[in-house]
Image (tube, rainbow, N blue to C red):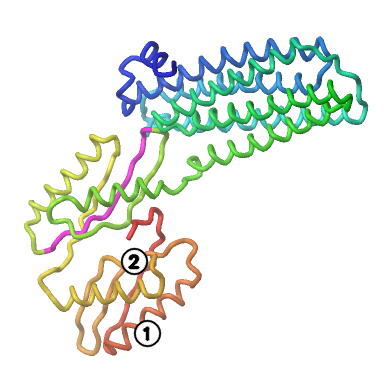
Amino acid sequence: MINFLIKKFIKDYKNTQDTKVRNAYGKFAGIVGIICNAVLFSLKITAGTLFGSVSITADAVNNLSDASSSVISLAGFKLSEKPADEDHPYGHGRYEYLSGLIVAVLIMVIGVELFKSSLEKVINPSPVDFSWISVCILTFSILLKLWMAFFNYGLGKKIKSATLTATGADSRNDVITTAAVLAAALISYFSGFELDGWMGIFVSLFILYSGIGIVKDTLDPLLGKAPDKEFVENIKNKILSYPGVLGTHDLLVHDYGPGRQFASVHVEMAAEEDVIKSHDVLDNIERDFLNEGLHMIVHFDPIVTSDSTVSNLRKWLAEQVAGIDENLTIHDLRVVPGVTHTNVIFDCVVPFDFNMTEGQLKNKISEIVNSKYPSYNCIITIDKSFAAMPH
């Protein structure tokens, strides 16, 4: 059914790399979410009010928050469609992340209010009128939310949307909370033990937990989360597949919203090759990545390959540095001979969780080099691994 709806309502649905098609997916998911959650809210708030159940009312308000979330998500996808302008040259794609953050805050506020009302019900309990109508409504809600979870997960996977994936997770959580409310109603009816207030507390805590998770998921890209390892590895393998490329490093990826990523990278090529030929290869790399939707700027790093002394030193030093920690790498090595000593100049890439200070690492590498080459003086620049290239 999900594929039928996609084909029916989304034009050119297969072209998910296109920003307009991607936004169409997001807006369609938002409209479906608004309709489904509005129906569930109306049914549950009626049942909760008629039969005096705080847990059903809490579940109804949870659906209302989901409907509000869908409205905000819909607005986020709509705003993210705005083209780049003079003040925002990278576009407005981060509106999608901001809408997700607003949704998360709204969910947490509602969770706090529901916790307070449920706690009041525990302190001052009042009887709940059991009704099979409520059981039917809750069962229908579970089935509909289960479908919505698959629906949003499916769309989120197709367009790689953290917002829709979070919405799918929220629908899955609603299945759990509504099932718990239903179980509490049945247990209370058959055992006589009143669980309504306690279940309201459980639902409110679950809502708060869900909100905190969504806050993290939406804040990460806004704060500059490191790119996915598989994404980085694909970039590396693609660059290394071009003729004449010897290595790559210093990859930086900037996320300005789904489908709006910009990157820069250093590519090593033989210094002895014709510059025009090497530049042509780099142009091809940039153009090919752009065709895949990634704006890539490539910096040319010439590597001396005709001097076996330098080549052997580079290979040996890379092995020695990796011996200190397998995540350490070197690049941009140059050898400058002098009268009394030889300067060995290079950069060393260090992961953020490395347990040595910069001074300690420089001293350690210098000791290793001097043990074999006493006249060599290491001049080391420490780089941070913003997007670690896999080994």
Residue at image position (61%, 16%) is 37
Q: Position of residue 32 (x, y in %)?
A: 51, 15
- Give the Cα separation between the discs numbered 2 and 1: 17 Å
For the question of whether residue 297 can be seen, the reply is yes
Q: Position of residue 79 (x, y in %)?
A: 46, 22
Magenta region: which residues?
259-271
Asked which quadrant contains residue 293, the reply is: top left
Give the answer, above or below, for where 111 lies relative to 391: above
Secondary structure beneath label 1 = helix
Q: Nearer the viewer, residue 5 or 327?
A: 5
- Give the class, few, some or many, for how many residues have Cα within 10 Å of label 1's Cα (few <14, many ≥20): some
Q: Position of residue 187 (x, y in %)?
A: 81, 26
Label 2 is placed on what type of residue? Thr
The N terminus - image quarter: top left
364 left or right of 128 in image: left
Asked which quadrant contains residue 301, the reply is: bottom left
Secondary structure beneath label 2 = strand
Give the answer, above or below, for where 18 lies relative to 44: below
Give the answer, above or below, for where 198 lies relative to 334: above
Residue at image position (45%, 72%) is 358
155 left or right of 142 in image: left
Asked which quadrant contains residue 169, the reply is: top right
Label 1 is placed on what type of residue? Glu
Residue at image position (75%, 23%) is 58
- Find disc 1 in the rendering and name its residue: 367
- Give the class, few, some or many, for how many residues have Cα within 10 Å of label 2's Cα (few <14, many ≥20): many
Q: Nearer the viewer, residue 265 or 323?
A: 323
- Give the number of the mark in front: 2 or 1: 2
362 left or right of 377 in image: right
- Find disc 2 in the rendering and name its residue: 329
Q: Nearer the viewer, residue 78 or 25?
A: 25
Residue at image position (36%, 28%) is 84
